[in-house]
Image (cartoon, rainbow, N blue to C red):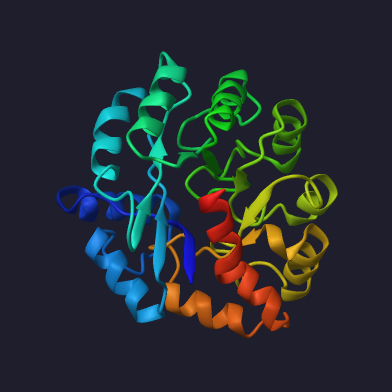
Amino acid sequence: MIDFHTHMFPEKIAGKTLRFLSERCKTAPFTEGTPQGLLSSAKDAGIACCVALPVVTNPEQFESVNRFAEQYREGPILSFGGIHPENEDYKGKLRYLRDHGFIGIKLHPDYQGTFFNDIRYKRIISYASELEMIVSVHAGFDPGYPDCVHCTPAMAREVIDEVAPDRLVLAHLGGFLHWDEVEQELVGRDVWFDTAVVFGRIPDEQLIRICRNHGTKRILFATDSPWSGQKESLEYFQKLDLADAEKAQILSENAKKLLTL
């Protein structure tokens, strides 16, 4: 089983970072936010591989964030790289990430203060696609920025229509708490959804409908650990009224395919 959306931080800043995010987002973490905490949680849940998604919150963090992430490019933790829309020479930085073994990047429009349909994101996604890199994006509402959604389903559809990326993953089932709009704008499009922190937040009937109408071959099991429990998320998922073959796709087969395309 593969968890396609997790977070971790260097041990020396993990405690401070989680306290800040917990207060800002009014939620409690399920681990201490370190690589070891993630590994322990995954082992307890029976998850073989965690995709870690680092967020570059300002352009100056590019080197430090990716230097930490570079330690985890294979094995039970597989980290993507990070890039900020204000980074200069974005093509050079994307080539740097690819050449240093990163197979994907993480973008977070809220924490990067940029709307997803901004031309800078479109350029990054377009070139990342040329480099055959996966692009994972936070989509929908974020509790840290409750007054503004920087990646709505409509913005995501604009990017898909203009850029046509073939390895774009929209987190939180296409748009956290915007699932009616996801059904209108994104279901059936050439894009992947992950399930990070959606269990119990979306009606099960709508979750299953989105998965099937979009195609379970385009859904990736994900938890957003440490912001939800991996074991608890897996137990919830296993109780959903999906066929065993559909669950197998979502839990592992789709992720393996995407990671090895």
**Left or right of 35: which side holds 181?**
right
Q: Is residue 195 above or below residue 82?
A: below
Q: Is residue 238 above or below residue 129?
A: below
Q: In this view, does 112 lie above or below 79?
A: above
Q: In this view, does 80 lie above or below 22?
A: above
**Left or right of 244: which side holds 107?**
left
Q: In which quarter of the image is residue 80?
A: top left
**Left or right of 130: which side holds 55?**
left
Residue 30: image x %, image y %?
A: 36, 69
Question: Which of the two residues, 70 or 184, is positioned nearer the viewer here?
Answer: 70
Q: Which residue lies furthest to the front in this view?
A: 261
Question: Which of the two residues, 72 or 194, is positioned nearer the viewer here?
Answer: 72
Q: Which residue is drawn at 58% across and 29% down?
A: 125
**Left or right of 19: which side holds 6?**
right
Q: Which residue is drawn at 74% across and 26% down?
A: 162
Q: Residue furthest left?
A: 12
Q: Which residue is drawn at 40% across and 50% down?
A: 24
Q: Residue furthest top?
A: 89
Residue 148: image x %, image y %?
A: 60, 37
Q: Residue at x 23, y 64 (%)?
A: 36
Residue 120: image x %, image y %?
A: 56, 20
Q: How many marks?
A: 0
Residue 13: image x %, image y %?
A: 19, 48
